[in-house]
Amino acid sequence: MAYHKPTYLFLFLPILLLIYQIAPRKFRRGVLLGAGYLFFWSISGKLVLYLIGTTIFTHYIGICLELQESRKKKRLVLAGGVLLLLGVLGYLKYYNFFAENISRMLEAAGSGMIIPARHLLLPIGISFYTLQAISYIADVYWKKIPAEKNLMKLALFLGFFPQIMEGPISTYGQTAEAIFRCDPLRLENLSSGAVRILWGLFKKIVIADRLYTLVQAVFDNHENFGGVIVFIAATAYTAQLYMEFSGCIDIVIGSARMFGVKLPENFRQPFASRNAAEFWRRWHITLGEWFKAYVFFPVSVSGPVKKWNRYGRKKFGKYITKAGASAMALFPVWLGNGLWHGARWSYIFFGMYYFAVLMAGIMAEPVRNKIIKTLHINEDASWFRALQIGKTWIIIIIGEMFFRANGLRAGIQMFQSMFGRPSGNLMTLGLDTADYVVILYGCAVVGLVGILRERNLLDGHMLRNLKLPVRWAIYYGLILAVLIFGAYGVGYQQVDLIYAGF
Protein backbone atom coordinates (compact mmCIF):
# COMPACT_ATOMS: atom_id res chain seq x y z
CA MET A 1 0.00 0.00 0.00
CA ALA A 2 1.31 3.43 -0.93
CA TYR A 3 -0.20 6.92 -0.75
CA HIS A 4 -0.88 7.21 -4.49
CA LYS A 5 -2.47 3.80 -4.97
CA PRO A 6 -6.21 2.98 -5.06
CA THR A 7 -5.94 0.76 -1.97
CA TYR A 8 -4.97 3.79 0.10
CA LEU A 9 -7.12 6.40 -1.62
CA PHE A 10 -10.39 4.45 -1.99
CA LEU A 11 -10.21 1.88 0.79
CA PHE A 12 -7.81 2.61 3.67
CA LEU A 13 -8.32 6.37 4.00
CA PRO A 14 -12.15 6.51 3.60
CA ILE A 15 -12.71 3.57 5.99
CA LEU A 16 -10.35 5.11 8.53
CA LEU A 17 -12.14 8.46 8.33
CA LEU A 18 -15.47 6.72 8.92
CA ILE A 19 -14.26 4.64 11.87
CA TYR A 20 -12.46 7.65 13.37
CA GLN A 21 -15.58 9.84 13.22
CA ILE A 22 -18.02 7.33 14.68
CA ALA A 23 -15.63 6.23 17.45
CA PRO A 24 -15.95 7.99 20.82
CA ARG A 25 -13.22 10.61 21.24
CA LYS A 26 -11.38 8.61 23.90
CA PHE A 27 -10.97 5.72 21.44
CA ARG A 28 -9.84 7.79 18.45
CA ARG A 29 -6.23 7.72 19.60
CA GLY A 30 -6.31 3.96 19.47
CA VAL A 31 -7.91 4.10 16.02
CA LEU A 32 -5.12 6.34 14.69
CA LEU A 33 -2.38 4.29 16.32
CA GLY A 34 -3.84 1.05 15.01
CA ALA A 35 -4.10 2.62 11.54
CA GLY A 36 -0.44 3.62 11.68
CA TYR A 37 0.73 0.15 12.64
CA LEU A 38 -1.62 -1.47 10.10
CA PHE A 39 -0.25 0.80 7.37
CA PHE A 40 3.32 -0.02 8.43
CA TRP A 41 2.56 -3.74 8.60
CA SER A 42 0.99 -3.71 5.11
CA ILE A 43 4.36 -2.67 3.70
CA SER A 44 6.95 -4.13 6.09
CA GLY A 45 5.09 -6.98 7.81
CA LYS A 46 6.53 -8.08 11.13
CA LEU A 47 9.22 -5.38 10.87
CA VAL A 48 6.63 -3.15 12.55
CA LEU A 49 8.33 -4.47 15.70
CA TYR A 50 11.26 -2.14 14.94
CA LEU A 51 8.92 0.87 15.11
CA ILE A 52 7.32 -0.40 18.32
CA GLY A 53 10.73 -1.09 19.85
CA THR A 54 12.04 2.35 18.85
CA THR A 55 8.96 3.97 20.42
CA ILE A 56 9.34 2.16 23.76
CA PHE A 57 13.09 2.84 23.88
CA THR A 58 12.65 6.53 23.01
CA HIS A 59 9.92 6.89 25.64
CA TYR A 60 12.09 5.60 28.46
CA ILE A 61 15.18 7.51 27.32
CA GLY A 62 13.11 10.71 27.54
CA ILE A 63 11.92 9.88 31.06
CA CYS A 64 15.44 8.92 32.12
CA LEU A 65 16.79 12.26 30.82
CA GLU A 66 14.26 14.17 32.88
CA LEU A 67 15.01 12.21 36.06
CA GLN A 68 18.76 12.80 35.89
CA GLU A 69 20.03 15.79 37.86
CA SER A 70 23.67 15.52 36.89
CA ARG A 71 24.52 17.19 33.55
CA LYS A 72 27.22 14.59 32.95
CA LYS A 73 24.76 11.72 33.39
CA LYS A 74 22.25 13.46 31.14
CA ARG A 75 24.89 13.68 28.43
CA LEU A 76 25.64 9.99 28.82
CA VAL A 77 21.96 9.08 28.55
CA LEU A 78 21.55 11.32 25.49
CA ALA A 79 24.66 9.90 23.84
CA GLY A 80 23.58 6.34 24.60
CA GLY A 81 20.10 6.94 23.20
CA VAL A 82 21.31 8.61 20.01
CA LEU A 83 24.04 6.01 19.44
CA LEU A 84 21.64 3.10 19.83
CA LEU A 85 19.06 4.64 17.50
CA LEU A 86 21.73 5.43 14.91
CA GLY A 87 23.33 2.03 15.50
CA VAL A 88 20.17 0.15 14.53
CA LEU A 89 19.71 2.39 11.49
CA GLY A 90 23.37 2.08 10.52
CA TYR A 91 23.49 -1.69 10.91
CA LEU A 92 20.36 -2.35 8.87
CA LYS A 93 21.03 0.26 6.20
CA TYR A 94 24.82 0.36 5.83
CA TYR A 95 26.32 -2.91 7.09
CA ASN A 96 26.53 -4.59 3.67
CA PHE A 97 27.87 -1.39 2.05
CA PHE A 98 30.76 -1.11 4.48
CA ALA A 99 31.34 -4.87 4.53
CA GLU A 100 31.71 -4.91 0.74
CA ASN A 101 34.08 -1.93 0.65
CA ILE A 102 36.23 -3.13 3.54
CA SER A 103 36.49 -6.55 1.87
CA ARG A 104 37.70 -4.88 -1.33
CA MET A 105 40.33 -2.95 0.61
CA LEU A 106 41.52 -6.11 2.35
CA GLU A 107 41.67 -7.92 -0.99
CA ALA A 108 43.71 -5.09 -2.52
CA ALA A 109 46.08 -5.28 0.44
CA GLY A 110 46.66 -8.98 -0.23
CA SER A 111 44.53 -10.30 2.63
CA GLY A 112 42.27 -13.26 1.99
CA MET A 113 39.82 -12.09 4.63
CA ILE A 114 36.27 -11.32 3.45
CA ILE A 115 33.52 -9.82 5.55
CA PRO A 116 30.39 -11.70 4.53
CA ALA A 117 27.24 -9.89 3.44
CA ARG A 118 24.05 -10.45 5.40
CA HIS A 119 20.44 -10.60 4.34
CA LEU A 120 18.98 -7.68 6.27
CA LEU A 121 15.37 -6.51 6.03
CA LEU A 122 14.91 -2.75 6.20
CA PRO A 123 11.65 -1.43 7.69
CA ILE A 124 9.85 1.20 5.62
CA GLY A 125 10.48 4.76 6.81
CA ILE A 126 13.23 3.84 9.30
CA SER A 127 15.28 6.91 8.33
CA PHE A 128 12.30 9.19 8.95
CA TYR A 129 11.09 7.85 12.30
CA THR A 130 14.66 7.50 13.59
CA LEU A 131 15.35 11.20 12.98
CA GLN A 132 12.06 12.10 14.69
CA ALA A 133 13.00 9.93 17.69
CA ILE A 134 16.43 11.59 17.94
CA SER A 135 14.88 15.05 17.71
CA TYR A 136 12.51 14.14 20.57
CA ILE A 137 15.21 13.00 23.00
CA ALA A 138 17.47 15.94 22.04
CA ASP A 139 14.62 18.39 22.69
CA VAL A 140 13.99 16.78 26.08
CA TYR A 141 17.72 17.09 26.87
CA TRP A 142 17.71 20.78 25.89
CA LYS A 143 14.48 21.28 27.90
CA LYS A 144 12.57 22.50 24.87
CA ILE A 145 9.82 20.03 25.80
CA PRO A 146 9.08 17.94 28.88
CA ALA A 147 9.49 14.19 28.66
CA GLU A 148 6.22 12.58 27.58
CA LYS A 149 4.82 10.27 30.26
CA ASN A 150 2.04 8.91 28.06
CA LEU A 151 3.51 6.17 25.85
CA MET A 152 0.53 6.26 23.46
CA LYS A 153 1.10 9.96 22.74
CA LEU A 154 4.71 9.33 21.76
CA ALA A 155 3.66 6.27 19.77
CA LEU A 156 1.16 8.37 17.81
CA PHE A 157 3.87 10.95 17.08
CA LEU A 158 6.31 8.32 15.71
CA GLY A 159 3.65 6.14 14.08
CA PHE A 160 1.26 8.69 12.56
CA PHE A 161 0.33 6.89 9.33
CA PRO A 162 0.67 9.76 6.78
CA GLN A 163 4.29 10.42 7.80
CA ILE A 164 5.62 6.89 8.11
CA MET A 165 6.74 6.36 4.52
CA GLU A 166 8.17 9.71 3.33
CA GLY A 167 7.88 12.29 6.09
CA PRO A 168 7.80 15.25 6.39
CA ILE A 169 10.08 15.06 9.41
CA SER A 170 8.46 16.92 12.28
CA THR A 171 9.48 17.68 15.84
CA TYR A 172 7.41 16.59 18.81
CA GLY A 173 6.40 20.17 19.56
CA GLN A 174 5.09 20.71 16.02
CA THR A 175 2.59 17.87 15.69
CA ALA A 176 2.21 15.64 18.76
CA GLU A 177 -0.47 17.71 20.50
CA ALA A 178 -2.68 18.01 17.40
CA ILE A 179 -2.45 14.28 16.67
CA PHE A 180 -3.23 13.34 20.26
CA ARG A 181 -6.13 15.80 20.55
CA CYS A 182 -8.17 13.82 18.01
CA ASP A 183 -10.58 16.59 17.05
CA PRO A 184 -13.80 15.65 15.24
CA LEU A 185 -13.72 15.76 11.45
CA ARG A 186 -14.65 19.12 9.94
CA LEU A 187 -15.94 19.79 6.44
CA GLU A 188 -13.36 22.53 5.90
CA ASN A 189 -10.49 20.17 6.75
CA LEU A 190 -11.93 17.39 4.62
CA SER A 191 -12.33 19.62 1.56
CA SER A 192 -8.93 21.33 1.82
CA GLY A 193 -7.29 17.96 2.46
CA ALA A 194 -8.98 16.39 -0.56
CA VAL A 195 -7.86 19.25 -2.84
CA ARG A 196 -4.27 18.90 -1.58
CA ILE A 197 -4.41 15.16 -2.29
CA LEU A 198 -5.71 15.80 -5.82
CA TRP A 199 -2.91 18.28 -6.46
CA GLY A 200 -0.36 15.71 -5.30
CA LEU A 201 -1.86 13.02 -7.54
CA PHE A 202 -1.68 15.40 -10.51
CA LYS A 203 2.05 15.93 -9.98
CA LYS A 204 2.77 12.27 -9.30
CA ILE A 205 0.58 10.40 -11.80
CA VAL A 206 0.30 12.87 -14.67
CA ILE A 207 3.88 14.21 -14.77
CA ALA A 208 6.35 12.20 -12.64
CA ASP A 209 5.24 8.73 -13.76
CA ARG A 210 5.52 9.77 -17.43
CA LEU A 211 9.00 11.19 -16.93
CA TYR A 212 10.06 7.91 -15.29
CA THR A 213 9.92 6.14 -18.66
CA LEU A 214 12.34 8.59 -20.29
CA VAL A 215 14.64 8.73 -17.27
CA GLN A 216 14.89 4.96 -16.93
CA ALA A 217 15.60 4.51 -20.66
CA VAL A 218 18.60 6.86 -20.56
CA PHE A 219 20.05 6.20 -17.10
CA ASP A 220 19.85 2.41 -17.42
CA ASN A 221 21.56 2.51 -20.84
CA HIS A 222 23.64 5.67 -20.49
CA GLU A 223 26.46 4.36 -22.65
CA ASN A 224 24.16 4.60 -25.70
CA PHE A 225 23.47 8.32 -25.24
CA GLY A 226 25.45 11.53 -25.31
CA GLY A 227 25.28 15.28 -25.60
CA VAL A 228 21.98 17.05 -25.13
CA ILE A 229 20.02 13.79 -24.60
CA VAL A 230 21.92 13.12 -21.36
CA PHE A 231 21.30 16.69 -20.19
CA ILE A 232 17.59 16.38 -21.04
CA ALA A 233 17.43 13.08 -19.11
CA ALA A 234 19.12 14.70 -16.09
CA THR A 235 16.66 17.60 -16.30
CA ALA A 236 13.77 15.13 -16.62
CA TYR A 237 14.92 13.26 -13.52
CA THR A 238 15.14 16.53 -11.56
CA ALA A 239 11.56 17.31 -12.58
CA GLN A 240 10.42 13.72 -11.89
CA LEU A 241 11.93 13.73 -8.41
CA TYR A 242 10.36 17.06 -7.53
CA MET A 243 6.94 16.21 -8.95
CA GLU A 244 6.89 12.83 -7.23
CA PHE A 245 8.33 13.78 -3.85
CA SER A 246 6.43 17.06 -3.52
CA GLY A 247 3.32 15.33 -4.91
CA CYS A 248 3.56 12.59 -2.29
CA ILE A 249 4.07 15.20 0.43
CA ASP A 250 0.92 16.95 -0.84
CA ILE A 251 -0.99 13.69 -0.39
CA VAL A 252 0.52 13.21 3.07
CA ILE A 253 -0.25 16.77 4.21
CA GLY A 254 -3.76 16.52 2.72
CA SER A 255 -4.40 13.22 4.52
CA ALA A 256 -3.26 14.67 7.86
CA ARG A 257 -5.28 17.82 7.27
CA MET A 258 -8.46 15.71 7.05
CA PHE A 259 -7.87 14.72 10.68
CA GLY A 260 -7.16 18.32 11.71
CA VAL A 261 -3.39 17.88 11.87
CA LYS A 262 -1.18 20.48 10.18
CA LEU A 263 2.12 18.94 9.15
CA PRO A 264 5.11 21.16 8.29
CA GLU A 265 5.61 22.06 4.64
CA ASN A 266 8.49 20.33 2.88
CA PHE A 267 8.81 22.44 -0.29
CA ARG A 268 8.59 26.15 -1.03
CA GLN A 269 9.11 26.84 -4.76
CA PRO A 270 12.70 25.48 -4.74
CA PHE A 271 13.34 26.25 -8.41
CA ALA A 272 12.95 29.97 -7.73
CA SER A 273 16.18 29.84 -5.69
CA ARG A 274 19.07 32.15 -6.55
CA ASN A 275 21.79 29.87 -5.17
CA ALA A 276 22.35 26.38 -3.81
CA ALA A 277 22.04 27.44 -0.16
CA GLU A 278 18.62 28.97 -0.82
CA PHE A 279 17.60 25.88 -2.79
CA TRP A 280 18.21 23.69 0.25
CA ARG A 281 16.16 26.05 2.41
CA ARG A 282 13.27 25.44 0.03
CA TRP A 283 13.77 21.73 -0.88
CA HIS A 284 13.10 18.91 1.61
CA ILE A 285 12.79 21.67 4.17
CA THR A 286 12.19 19.43 7.18
CA LEU A 287 15.33 17.35 6.56
CA GLY A 288 17.38 20.53 6.19
CA GLU A 289 15.92 21.96 9.39
CA TRP A 290 16.66 18.71 11.22
CA PHE A 291 20.33 18.79 10.17
CA LYS A 292 20.50 22.50 11.02
CA ALA A 293 19.06 22.06 14.51
CA TYR A 294 20.66 18.76 15.52
CA VAL A 295 23.99 18.74 13.66
CA PHE A 296 24.97 22.19 12.31
CA PHE A 297 24.22 24.27 15.42
CA PRO A 298 25.74 21.80 17.95
CA VAL A 299 28.93 21.58 15.88
CA SER A 300 29.00 25.38 15.43
CA VAL A 301 29.16 25.95 19.18
CA SER A 302 31.44 22.99 19.92
CA GLY A 303 34.87 23.37 21.51
CA PRO A 304 36.96 22.76 18.34
CA VAL A 305 35.01 25.39 16.36
CA LYS A 306 35.32 27.94 19.17
CA LYS A 307 39.09 27.32 19.34
CA TRP A 308 39.38 27.72 15.58
CA ASN A 309 37.46 31.01 15.69
CA ARG A 310 39.81 32.43 18.33
CA TYR A 311 42.90 31.21 16.52
CA GLY A 312 41.69 32.16 13.03
CA ARG A 313 40.81 35.75 13.90
CA LYS A 314 44.35 36.33 15.16
CA LYS A 315 46.15 34.60 12.28
CA PHE A 316 43.99 34.70 9.14
CA GLY A 317 41.32 37.37 9.36
CA LYS A 318 37.52 37.38 9.27
CA TYR A 319 36.73 35.67 5.95
CA ILE A 320 39.13 32.72 6.22
CA THR A 321 38.02 32.14 9.80
CA LYS A 322 34.39 32.18 8.72
CA ALA A 323 35.12 29.76 5.87
CA GLY A 324 36.97 27.38 8.19
CA ALA A 325 34.19 27.41 10.80
CA SER A 326 31.59 26.91 8.07
CA ALA A 327 33.51 23.95 6.67
CA MET A 328 33.75 22.30 10.10
CA ALA A 329 29.99 22.65 10.65
CA LEU A 330 28.83 21.91 7.09
CA PHE A 331 30.96 18.81 6.46
CA PRO A 332 29.11 16.49 8.88
CA VAL A 333 25.79 17.92 7.66
CA TRP A 334 26.45 17.06 4.03
CA LEU A 335 28.17 13.76 4.74
CA GLY A 336 25.11 12.86 6.81
CA ASN A 337 22.76 14.12 4.09
CA GLY A 338 24.44 11.89 1.49
CA LEU A 339 24.49 8.83 3.74
CA TRP A 340 20.89 9.41 4.87
CA HIS A 341 19.70 8.78 1.31
CA GLY A 342 21.30 5.36 1.17
CA ALA A 343 24.39 3.17 1.13
CA ARG A 344 25.91 4.14 -2.22
CA TRP A 345 29.02 6.08 -3.21
CA SER A 346 26.90 8.20 -5.55
CA TYR A 347 24.87 9.41 -2.55
CA ILE A 348 28.03 10.23 -0.62
CA PHE A 349 29.34 12.08 -3.68
CA PHE A 350 26.01 13.95 -3.87
CA GLY A 351 26.49 15.19 -0.31
CA MET A 352 30.11 16.18 -0.91
CA TYR A 353 29.11 17.88 -4.17
CA TYR A 354 26.80 20.26 -2.33
CA PHE A 355 29.36 20.71 0.44
CA ALA A 356 31.86 21.87 -2.19
CA VAL A 357 29.29 24.10 -3.94
CA LEU A 358 28.24 25.79 -0.67
CA MET A 359 31.84 26.26 0.46
CA ALA A 360 32.72 27.78 -2.92
CA GLY A 361 29.85 30.23 -2.46
CA ILE A 362 31.04 31.20 1.04
CA MET A 363 34.67 31.64 -0.06
CA ALA A 364 33.73 33.64 -3.17
CA GLU A 365 31.36 35.94 -1.28
CA PRO A 366 33.86 38.82 -0.73
CA VAL A 367 34.88 38.82 -4.40
CA ARG A 368 31.25 38.59 -5.52
CA ASN A 369 30.20 41.50 -3.31
CA LYS A 370 33.09 43.61 -4.56
CA ILE A 371 32.23 42.95 -8.23
CA ILE A 372 28.55 43.80 -7.66
CA LYS A 373 29.51 47.02 -5.86
CA THR A 374 32.07 48.05 -8.50
CA LEU A 375 29.72 47.42 -11.43
CA HIS A 376 26.74 48.97 -9.60
CA ILE A 377 24.61 45.87 -10.24
CA ASN A 378 21.07 45.93 -8.90
CA GLU A 379 20.65 42.50 -7.35
CA ASP A 380 16.87 42.80 -7.58
CA ALA A 381 16.92 43.41 -11.33
CA SER A 382 15.00 40.80 -13.32
CA TRP A 383 17.93 39.96 -15.61
CA PHE A 384 20.28 39.41 -12.66
CA ARG A 385 17.75 37.26 -10.81
CA ALA A 386 17.17 35.18 -13.98
CA LEU A 387 20.93 34.71 -14.35
CA GLN A 388 21.26 33.51 -10.77
CA ILE A 389 18.29 31.14 -11.06
CA GLY A 390 19.68 29.71 -14.33
CA LYS A 391 23.05 29.09 -12.67
CA THR A 392 21.31 27.38 -9.75
CA TRP A 393 19.31 25.14 -12.11
CA ILE A 394 22.54 23.89 -13.70
CA ILE A 395 24.00 23.11 -10.26
CA ILE A 396 20.82 21.25 -9.28
CA ILE A 397 20.54 19.25 -12.51
CA ILE A 398 24.17 18.09 -12.40
CA GLY A 399 23.78 17.10 -8.75
CA GLU A 400 20.60 15.12 -9.43
CA MET A 401 22.27 13.35 -12.37
CA PHE A 402 24.93 11.94 -10.02
CA PHE A 403 22.21 11.20 -7.46
CA ARG A 404 20.19 9.09 -9.94
CA ALA A 405 23.10 7.47 -11.82
CA ASN A 406 23.59 3.75 -11.32
CA GLY A 407 26.76 4.22 -9.34
CA LEU A 408 29.42 6.92 -9.10
CA ARG A 409 31.33 5.64 -12.13
CA ALA A 410 28.18 5.80 -14.27
CA GLY A 411 27.57 9.37 -13.05
CA ILE A 412 31.06 10.44 -14.08
CA GLN A 413 30.63 8.81 -17.49
CA MET A 414 27.28 10.55 -18.01
CA PHE A 415 28.74 13.90 -17.01
CA GLN A 416 31.56 13.46 -19.53
CA SER A 417 29.18 12.31 -22.26
CA MET A 418 27.15 15.54 -21.97
CA PHE A 419 30.09 17.33 -23.58
CA GLY A 420 30.55 14.69 -26.29
CA ARG A 421 28.87 14.13 -29.60
CA PRO A 422 25.05 14.07 -29.44
CA SER A 423 23.57 10.59 -29.73
CA GLY A 424 20.07 9.25 -29.17
CA ASN A 425 16.55 10.28 -30.09
CA LEU A 426 13.83 11.49 -27.72
CA MET A 427 11.17 9.67 -29.74
CA THR A 428 12.78 6.28 -29.03
CA LEU A 429 12.67 6.58 -25.23
CA GLY A 430 9.22 5.12 -24.63
CA LEU A 431 7.21 8.34 -24.89
CA ASP A 432 5.27 9.67 -27.86
CA THR A 433 4.38 13.22 -28.87
CA ALA A 434 1.20 13.21 -26.78
CA ASP A 435 3.21 12.24 -23.67
CA TYR A 436 5.63 15.11 -24.19
CA VAL A 437 2.76 17.54 -24.67
CA VAL A 438 1.11 16.38 -21.41
CA ILE A 439 4.43 16.67 -19.55
CA LEU A 440 5.08 20.20 -20.85
CA TYR A 441 1.56 21.41 -20.09
CA GLY A 442 1.63 19.73 -16.67
CA CYS A 443 4.96 21.36 -15.78
CA ALA A 444 3.59 24.71 -17.02
CA VAL A 445 0.60 24.39 -14.68
CA VAL A 446 2.80 23.50 -11.70
CA GLY A 447 5.18 26.32 -12.62
CA LEU A 448 2.33 28.85 -12.84
CA VAL A 449 1.01 27.80 -9.43
CA GLY A 450 4.55 28.13 -8.06
CA ILE A 451 4.90 31.66 -9.46
CA LEU A 452 1.58 32.70 -7.92
CA ARG A 453 2.61 31.26 -4.56
CA GLU A 454 6.02 32.90 -4.74
CA ARG A 455 4.30 36.25 -5.23
CA ASN A 456 1.79 35.50 -2.42
CA LEU A 457 -1.09 35.52 -4.89
CA LEU A 458 -2.33 32.02 -4.09
CA ASP A 459 -2.93 29.98 -0.97
CA GLY A 460 -5.60 27.69 0.42
CA HIS A 461 -7.69 30.55 1.81
CA MET A 462 -7.71 32.37 -1.53
CA LEU A 463 -8.90 29.22 -3.30
CA ARG A 464 -11.78 28.84 -0.85
CA ASN A 465 -12.75 32.47 -1.36
CA LEU A 466 -13.20 32.06 -5.11
CA LYS A 467 -16.72 32.05 -6.49
CA LEU A 468 -18.35 28.63 -6.30
CA PRO A 469 -18.41 27.92 -10.09
CA VAL A 470 -14.73 28.90 -10.45
CA ARG A 471 -13.69 26.83 -7.45
CA TRP A 472 -15.53 23.73 -8.63
CA ALA A 473 -14.19 24.20 -12.15
CA ILE A 474 -10.68 23.93 -10.66
CA TYR A 475 -11.65 20.85 -8.62
CA TYR A 476 -13.19 19.07 -11.60
CA GLY A 477 -10.25 20.10 -13.77
CA LEU A 478 -7.86 18.37 -11.37
CA ILE A 479 -10.02 15.25 -11.15
CA LEU A 480 -10.39 14.97 -14.92
CA ALA A 481 -6.67 15.65 -15.48
CA VAL A 482 -5.73 12.77 -13.16
CA LEU A 483 -8.36 10.42 -14.65
CA ILE A 484 -7.72 11.25 -18.32
CA PHE A 485 -4.01 12.07 -18.43
CA GLY A 486 -2.70 9.90 -15.60
CA ALA A 487 0.13 7.56 -16.62
CA TYR A 488 -1.49 4.21 -15.87
CA GLY A 489 -2.96 1.34 -17.84
CA VAL A 490 -1.53 -0.34 -20.93
CA GLY A 491 1.92 0.96 -21.87
CA TYR A 492 2.73 2.45 -18.47
CA GLN A 493 4.54 0.89 -15.53
CA GLN A 494 3.44 1.42 -11.92
CA VAL A 495 6.17 3.50 -10.34
CA ASP A 496 7.06 3.07 -6.68
CA LEU A 497 7.70 6.14 -4.55
CA ILE A 498 11.38 7.13 -4.78
CA TYR A 499 11.79 8.51 -1.27
CA ALA A 500 10.10 5.50 0.30
CA GLY A 501 13.42 3.74 -0.37
CA PHE A 502 15.37 6.24 1.72
Image (cartoon, rainbow, N blue to C red):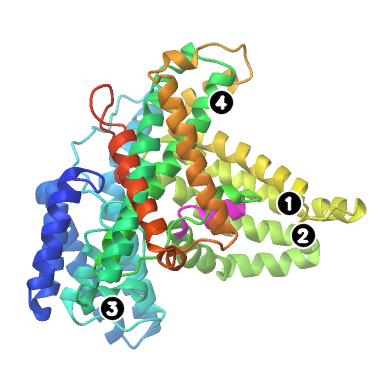
Q: Which mark is residue 363?
A: 1
Q: Is residue 425 rendered to the left or right of residue 86?
A: right
The answer to which image quadrant residue 19 occupies is: bottom left
Task: Answer with mark 3 or mark 1, whichever residue precedes in sequence.
Answer: 3
Foreground label between 3 and 1: 3
Foreground label between 3 and 2: 3
Percent position of residue 327, x then y: 62, 54
- Residue in the foreground of this view, choosing between 122 and 208: 208
Inspect the image, locate mark 2, and give the three-letter code of the amino acid beneath it. Tyr
- Disc 2 + disc 4, Cβ < 8 Å: no
Percent position of residue 458, x then y: 51, 61
Task: Answer with mark 2 or mark 4, whichever residue precedes in sequence.
Answer: 4
Q: How far is the residue under mark 3 from the one under mark 1? A: 43 Å
Magenta portion: prevailing SS class: helix
Disc 4 designates what residue? 231
- Residue in the foreground of this view, choosing between 380 and 67: 380
Inspect the image, locate mark 1, and give the three-letter code of the amino acid beneath it. Met
Q: Quadrant of the C terminus?
A: top left
Q: Residues within 10 Å of mark 4 (few under 14, many from 20)?
A: many
Q: How far is the residue under mark 2 from the one under mark 4? A: 36 Å
Residue at left 41%, top 19%? 432
Q: How far is the residue under mark 2 from the one under mark 1? A: 8 Å
Foreground label between 2 and 4: 4
Residue span colored magenta = 277-285
Q: Is residue 18 rendered to the left or right of residue 219?
A: left
Task: Answer with mark 3 or mark 2, whichever residue precedes in sequence.
Answer: 3
Disc 3 designates what residue? 177
